[in-house]
Amino acid sequence: MDVINLSELSLMLKTAATRVIYNKRKIDKINVFPVADQDTGSNLTKTLASFKQALGQNAVSTDSLLTKALEAGLASSQGNSGLLIISYLGGLLESLKNKSEIGYFDFSNAFHSATSAAVKSVENPLEGTMLDVMEAFSQSFSADVPGNKQLNRPFERALAATRESLVKTESKMKILLDNNVVDAGALGFTFFIFGFSEKITKVTLDLSTLDVSPVKILPDLKNLENPYEVIFILENPTLTQDELRDILHPYGDSLDIVELENKAKIHIHTDNPEAVEATAQVLGEVGSIETFDMRIKNPNHV
């Protein structure tokens, strides 16, 4: 196989989402960073389930359908992992827009754009996270022999590099090393990209040599420095990502900003949610806003 069409791309995206959704509990149970609230798999699932549902059962896919799916995923996205995966998808699909056939160089450019978009959405990119495996996949895919037209080999090489990068996340952050786990977000993306590649490689993710046992001892969430998570959407924002980041930075950490079409979605952990909510109202037209106390298990916070 040397090219795919939009309908095949849609099928690949649905398979990617399905693999994450199916493995939600495995991802949740090893989640200790940035907050050990065991919801990384759930946040990815909420985001990707809406994205997948919007793609529907149509045999024929179009750019407009993919855009609608992206908007649905953005509206449902939650947590650092949810915003990261939707920013990745935004960069990927923007790069592939208006292409009836997608080949090696199209994919190479798209994976680079997707990774760049994900990195740009994070205020403080760290090693040992989902960004590592995104970068590993993109770099390995693009390193294939020039002139190659077949897709299976670069995908297979990139998957091997992704799995290797996933294993290495454990050694890059003390909290992961202390708990003897890989990063939950990185595991979630690995399920995603293996699922995405299945149609071409026929390879599924082998976890037999990875320690994905549930974390036995979790940190005490009662002592979180920034215990509230605020997530809101701005309609038709007039400020850039950097301008929004400068304004919101003083209020907390884990600040993520995703821009898609005419919307911006912002996620932040804070100790002063009232101030963030008030600031959101003066930044533009607020489409939706939610605040969660991460010290409390909220049934509405999937």
Image: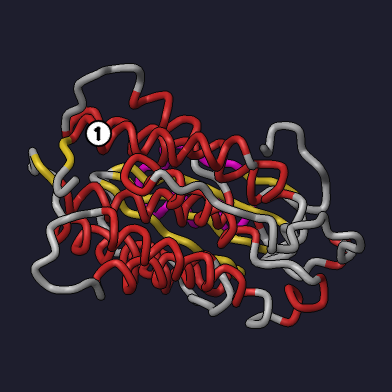
Whether residue 102 appears in magenta in the rendering, the answer is no
Res 251 → quadrant = bottom right
Residue type at numbered disc 1 = Glu
Residue where numbered disc 1 is placed: 8
Asked whether the viewer can see residue 180, the reply is: yes
Whether residue 282 appears in magenta in the rendering, the answer is yes
Res 143 → quadrant = bottom left
171 shown above or below 271: below
Residue 283, x across and y down, in percent: 39, 55
204 shown above or below 114: above
Answer with left or right where residue 145 lies relative to residue 26. Answer: left
Residue 60, x across and y down, in percent: 19, 21
Q: Quadrant of the C terminus?
A: top right
User: In the structure shown, which secondary structural element does the residue marked by tag 1 occupy?
Assistant: helix
120 shown above or below 75: below
Front residue of 63/11: it is 11
> What residue is at 55 percent from the left and 42 percent from the top?
20
> What residue is at 65 percent from the left and 53 percent from the top?
229
Front residue of 100/205: it is 205
Front residue of 254/18: it is 18
Stretch in magenta: 274-290
> What residue is at 38 percent from the left and 66 percent from the top?
137
Asked whether the viewer can see residue 278, the reply is: no
Q: Please tell me how crowded label 1 is: few (under 14), some (14-19), or many (20+) other residues with Cα within 10 Å.
A: some
Front residue of 189/252: it is 189
Residue 41, x across and y down, in percent: 64, 46
Query: How many numbered dots are placed on residues in this image?
Result: 1
> What residue is at 75 percent from the left and 51 percent from the top?
38
